[in-house]
Amino acid sequence: MSKTPEPPALTLLTNGVREDAMTNGADPEPMSRDWNYHPDLPLADSSVFRWPPEPRFLARWLVRNWLMLSERVVMVLLAVTCWSLFYPSLDTARTFAFGWVFQVWLVNMGLMVVIAGGLHWYFYLRRGQGKALKFDRRDQARSNRLWEFSNQVYDNMFWSLGSGVVQLTLYQAVIMWMMANGYAPTIALASNPVLFVAGLVLLPIWSAFHFYWAHRLLHIPFIYKHVHSVHHRNVNIGPWSGLSMHPVEHSIYLSSLLIHCVVPSHPIHLFFHVIYLGPGAAMTHAGYEDLLIKDRRRLALGTFYHQLHHRFYECNYGNQEMPWDRWFGTFHDGSEDGTKATRARKKRMHSNI
Ligand SMILES: [Zn+2]
Ligand SMILES: [Zn+2]
């Protein structure tokens, strides 16, 4: 795939954004109406559950996600590295002590700073690929009192590190302690290699299922207003936006990890899941569709699917791999009709408050 040039305007969507397009005195209309880049629209159905099943599509999905350099492969490699080198062992986790919990927190802080910070540095400070494959035209907001410290990136770092990484660590530490003491079921890699691999493949699917329903809950108007709106101030998202949430949202979002209390898993599964939910959110919110290396797409990052959610709110609560949005009528395919339907839903949902 060749490099996407600097914009000519790709006007396929009018938008419902009420945000801060009016910054430099220029006419905001064309700026706020266009995307800098979007994939071919309407979005195709890339759910692994689409019916009837197509073996070739499923095989391609497996290869793309698991047999090439992908977000998932990167995260599993990170999980294995952290398991063998950086996180404390389950033996250590048998009794609660400040030392090893602090160690887990330190590793999680390091992962978050390196991944979110690295992506932010590459895309937004070094401008490593300019605006190629960047969905939104705008840069991250500054000098705007909507944000803590009047700065979107500082604000996002504050919520991500101050609450996100802390809660991620607490969930992880409690589950490690449960695994170490036999309160959570575990499997050994040597005796269960098939289950081990299946667990890695299935975890993101479980997480997408959990994310859809937790996210529907967060969009109940009262909860949205007091909790989820913290995340949604990010209409124009960047890597630090991914885990930037209200503390109540963190505890709901991260409860996906509780699956390890009931389904037998290996600590590597837990660590993969932790990385998937924490630093992984920085990858999916990068604001760019792919990382380009020498003009070739080398690593998939954000999806237009979730970008539409950040712009139009009441659509695309899940992700592309699960069919929930399609089944429950909340799918926005990027077309004008999708925008109209989403606006009508938003009006209905918020008319009583
Ligand atoms: Zn988001
Ligand atoms: Zn939302």
Image (cartoon, rainbow, N blue to C red):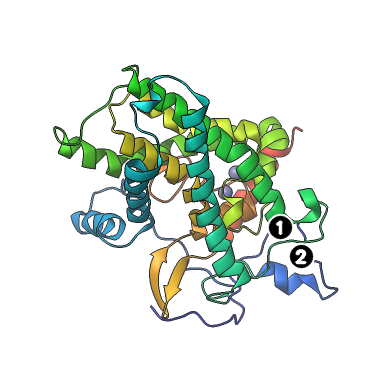
Please tell me in which quadrant of the rendered image residue 351 appears: top right
Q: Is mark 1 within 8 Å of ligand 2?
A: no
Look at label 1 and name its amino acid: Val
What's the residue at 81%, 74% (across, down)? 27
Closer to viewer: mark 1 or mark 2: 2
Q: Is mark 2 within 8 Å of ligand 1?
A: no
What's the residue at 38%, 69% (across, down)? 298
- From the viewer's perspective, is 349 left or right of 272? right
User: Measured along the vertical axis of the image, is residue 19 above or below residue 326?
Assistant: below
What's the residue at 57%, 50% (across, down)? 242
| Badge 1 vs badge 2, beta-carbon distance below 8 Å | yes
Looking at the image, can residue 335 be seen?
Answer: no
User: Measured along the vertical axis of the image, is residue 139 above or below residue 102?
Assistant: below
- Residue holding disc 2: 21
**Secondary structure state at the residue bearing disc 1:** loop
User: Measured along the vertical axis of the image, is residue 151 above or below residue 5?
Assistant: above
**Secondary structure state at the residue bearing disc 2:** loop
User: Measured along the vertical axis of the image, is residue 123 above or below residue 152?
Assistant: below
Q: Which mark is residue 111?
A: none
Residue 13 is situated, as x and y percent measured from the top left of the image, at 61, 66
Distance between mark 1 and mark 2 Cα atoms: 9 Å
**Foreground residue, 246 or 109?**
109
How many other residues sit within 10 Å of disc 1, few (<14), some (14-19) or many (≥20)? Answer: some
Residue 9 is situated, as x and y percent measured from the top left of the image, at 62, 78
Residue 61 is situated, as x and y percent measured from the top left of the image, at 28, 56
**Foreground residue, 76 or 310?**
76
- From the viewer's perspective, is 37 left or right of 150? left
Please tell me in which quadrant of the rendered image residue 141 appears: bottom right
Look at label 2 and name its amino acid: Ala
- Residue holding disc 1: 17
Residue 8 is situated, as x and y percent measured from the top left of the image, at 60, 82
